[in-house]
Amino acid sequence: MHGTLSLNGTWALYHAEGDHRLHVRHYAADTLRGGRALSAPVPAPVHQVLLDAGLLEELNVGLNSLKARWVEERFWIYRHT
């Protein structure tokens, strides 16, 4: 039987710094310790989730896009159960 599974909805968004391979086992665990999950609607880009959470300033204003470079230096993980 073939069907479709919608991935749309609200997911938890986590981040890890550095080499993401060091964190795979941690983020694959049934429960996560430490770190704060952001409520993230899917589909939505990470930058938009961070803007909505007040963690970024509008990227098209002044030098805000340069201040947001840290987003690209992290490994982002969406989780949903």
Image (spheres, grey):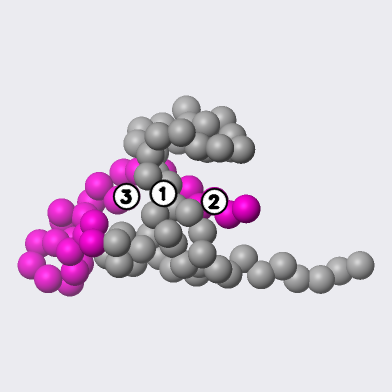
Secondary structure beneath label 3: helix
- Residue nearer the viewer, 11 or 20: 11
Closer to the chain start, of discs 3 and 1, is 1
CB atoms at circles 3 and 1 under 8 Å apart?
no
User: What is the three-letter code of the residue carrying label 1?
Assistant: Ala
Q: Is residue 7 left or right of residue 55?
A: right
Label 3 sits on residue: 72
Within the image, what quadrant is residue 17 found in? top left
Q: Is residue 53 left or right of residue 3?
A: left
Closer to the chain start, of discs 2 and 3, is 3
Q: Which one is in front in this view, the residue at disc 2 or the one at disc 3? A: 2
Q: Which residues are magenta?
A: 54-81
Q: Residue furthest right?
A: 1
Label 1 crowd bin: few (<14), some (14–19), many (20+), radius 10 Å: some
Q: Which one is in front in this view, the residue at disc 3 or the one at disc 1? A: 1
Within the image, what quadrant is residue 36 found in? top left
CB atoms at circles 1 and 2 under 8 Å apart?
yes
User: What is the three-letter code of the residue carrying label 3?
Assistant: Glu
Label 2 crowd bin: few (<14), some (14–19), many (20+), radius 10 Å: few
Number of numbered tags placed on the structure image: 3
* Quarter of the image where the N terminus is located: bottom right
Q: Is residue 61 above or below residue 34?
A: below
Secondary structure beneath label 1: loop
Q: Residue furthest left?
A: 62
Q: Residue at x 66, y 70 (%)?
A: 6
Q: Position of residue 33 (x, y in %)?
A: 46, 33
Label 2 sits on residue: 79
